[in-house]
Image (cartoon, grey):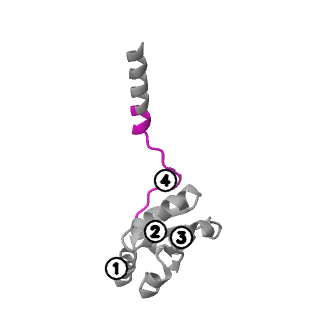
Amino acid sequence: MKLSFFGIALTSILALSSCKTTHSAEFPKANIKEVVMSSDVTLVDVRIPEQYAAGTAKNAINIPLADIQNELETLKGKKVVVFCNKGVQADQAMEILKKNGVEAYDGTSWKNVKGIQDEANKK
């Protein structure tokens, strides 16, 4: 009896741990270059104001990661690309935004987003 219960418990744990449920299914996968260059996108730099002031992507607004939760209502209904220095804060912002129903895309770093803009402007 103990062995049977253990087997069922182990099977259940393995089955549950292998299932990943994410909120990303709410919005289709998109080409980040197309999203960054779309006319209706809001680019959000989630770094601290001093880093934002030192350089960012064109037309980006600054909403530091620490403030993103307080700005949810202003971002709802918009297509948002978030980015930072290396992507760590952007990942955290993505999690918060998607959990709250914001159509968010990961631009990773400000240099990546700026590079996409620069490349598109050369054409």
Residue span colored magenta: 14-31
Q: Nearer the viewer, residue 28 or 122?
A: 28
Q: Nearer the viewer, mark 1 or mark 3?
A: 3
The residue indicated by pointer 2 is: 35
In space, the residues marked 1 and 4 are separated at their CA atoms by: 28 Å
Earlier residue among tags 4 and 2:
4
Q: Amino acid at mark 3?
A: Ala
Q: Amino acid at mark 4?
A: Ser
Residue 116 coordinates in the image, percent (x, y): 37, 76
In space, the residues marked 1 and 3 are separated at their CA atoms by: 31 Å
The residue indicated by pointer 1 is: 119
Q: Nearer the viewer, mark 4 or mark 2?
A: 4
Decide: is 77 above or below 61.
above
Decide: is 35 above or below 6.
below
In space, the residues marked 3 and 2 are separated at their CA atoms by: 24 Å
Identity of the residue furthest to the right in this view: 73
Earlier residue among tags 1 and 2:
2
- Residues under numbered marks 4 and 3 in contact, where contact means CB atoms less than 8 Å apart: no
- Label 2 CA crowd tier, 10 Å (few <14, some 14–19, many 20+): some
- Label 1 CA crowd tier, 10 Å (few <14, some 14–19, many 20+): few
Question: Where, quadrant-wise, is the N terminus in this rendering?
Answer: top left
The residue indicated by pointer 3 is: 66
Q: Residue 24: give its label.
A: 4
Identity of the residue furthest to the front in this view: 2
- Residues under numbered marks 1 and 2 in contact, where contact means CB atoms less than 8 Å apart: no
User: Is residue 20 a member of the stretch shown in magenta?
Assistant: yes
Q: Nearer the viewer, residue 66 or 68?
A: 66
SS for callout 2? helix
Q: Amino acid at mark 2?
A: Val
